[in-house]
Amino acid sequence: MLTYDFGKREKTSLYEYLYKCIKEDILSGKIKANEKLPSKREMAKNHDISVITVENAYAQLIVEGYIYTKEKKGYFASDIGSQYIEQKPKVKYEKKKEKKKWLVDFNSNHIMYDSFPFATWSRIMRQTLLDKENSFLSVPEKNGVMELREAIADHLQHFRGMNVNPDNIIVGAGTEYLYSIIVQLLGRDKVIAVEDPGYKKIGNVYESNGVKCLHIKIDQRGIQLNELVESKADAVHISPSHQFPTGRVMPISRRTHLLKWAINNKKYIIEDDYDSEFRFSGKPIPPIAGMEGKRVIYMNTFSKTLAPSIRIAYMVLPDELMDKFNTKLGFYSNTVSGFEQYTLANFISKGYYERHINRMRNYYRDYRNKIIRTIQNHPIYSKVSIEEENSGLHFILNINKKIDDEQFKKELQQNNINISGVSDYCYNNLDEFKHKFIINYSAVSEENLKKALDVMNEALSE
């Protein structure tokens, strides 16, 4: 008689536990092929369970082919060739370690919880459900729902000075997905230049799609044109409005020369308008795509201005590439849910996005000023200087003495402070970026900042 310990079933139902036990015995060979199993009544009596429980377990085993029945003779184990079935060892699930919680994390650029317009967003979501209930039953257009593309085009015209055709906009789930689309449009045989130092994931994504990347040094005005020309790259990926990690802004003269390079040589500029919404002094510099649209692919995302979990990004393609997308990649399904797209479209078109950006710009300007004042009023200020603080949600803290950058970071980490240097984002060994550290301030409290500055000051005094 087969006997199983039902005390080991934990939260598993009775019939499922019995089914698993018999199945494992058949697979392991403990129950031989064509061996007769106990009747339902015998199995139930032996384990003090109901006949229905046994019946359900046997029924599942029959459906999956582990046992079979003979009329008036009972249940028998199937010959499943278990000797050819690899028995996978049971893997004990180990709970992942919780992500380390830093006292201060200067690498984090997430926004403050209370800065997201939850009430407005939820109200628009409810209204969208009522207004667009029929639209949820249809598949979104391949490059995004028209309402969102029209809202984005209107936003770009009013706030970035760009005259954009909504049909040239592609909406996608994050910029990384859009990078892969760009690779397919340009061709995997092309060479793309990226900034050095720069956000390393950009080059990683391109290279993972089979494209060769060249890392071109930047100077105070952005990517170096002479090196770019000599590189023979087919396209260049830049963040001219707020370069990461240096925070530098490309002046109009460099933008003009870069655009001439693209037009004269039939190259493409991939303009990542990263952090352009958060400029705190002077007027925002118009994007290169607003100067000329035939050789520029414009990209932006709502992850930074709204929330990282809202994985909605977009790019504006020149006519030639948009035609190519429609012809060769038109079979793609859109990667963002229609519900989220309609909600965001309403959020933008009804003016909530503009008000949110203005509120966040004022909030972060004031918060940046508090953070900088805290540094200026601390003893550490005699040993450091602040650079590129006029735009974006990070600035550079320059250490005005020679230090071992790695040892400095290690000592801070031992005191529960996480920080990265600009040199961490260099592909080549660029000495000019040593002793410069990135301060993402958007989620750093003043109280914890003072504690971090005490640790940093002590480390610099050694």
Image: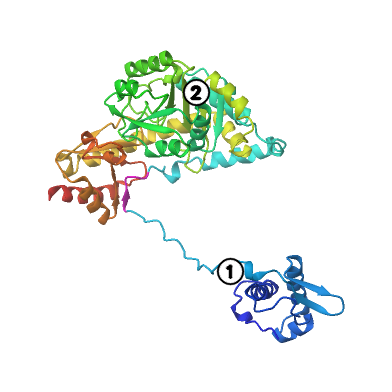
SS at badge 1: loop
* Numbered label attached to residue 365: none
Q: Where in the figure is residue 426, as x and y percent of width and height?
A: 29, 37
Q: Is residue 419 visible?
A: yes
Q: Is residue 166 visible?
A: no
Left or right of 439? Residue 233 is right
- Neighbor class of circle 2 (other Cα within 10 Å; few <14, some 14-19, many 20+) is some
SS at badge 2: helix
Find the residue positioned furthest to the left: 462
Is residue 325 placed above or below 360 in the rendered structure?
above
Residue closest to the eye, 402 or 230: 230
Instruction: Between label 2 and label 1, give the one nearer the viewer.
Output: 1
Residue closest to the eye, 408 or 447: 408
Q: Is 373 one of the magenta-colored residues?
A: no
Q: Amino acid at mark 1?
A: Gln
Q: Which residue is mark 2?
A: 156
Residue closest to the eye, 237 or 187: 187
Q: Are marks 2 and 1 in contact (CB under 8 Å)?
A: no
Q: Where in the figure is residue 78, as x and y percent of width and height?
A: 74, 72
When asked about the image quadrant of residue 69, the answer is bottom right
- Neighbor class of circle 1 (other Cα within 10 Å; few <14, some 14-19, many 20+) is few
For the N terminus, give its image quadrant: bottom right
Prevailing SS of the magenta stretch: loop
For the record, the magenta segment spans: 103-108
* Numbered label attached to residue 87: 1
Residue at left 75%, top 76%? 34
Residue at left 50%, top 20%? 157
Q: Where in the figure is residue 39, as x and y percent of width and height?
A: 78, 81
Is residue 186 placed above or below 119 in the rendered structure?
above
When asked about the image quadrant of residue 139, the answer is top right
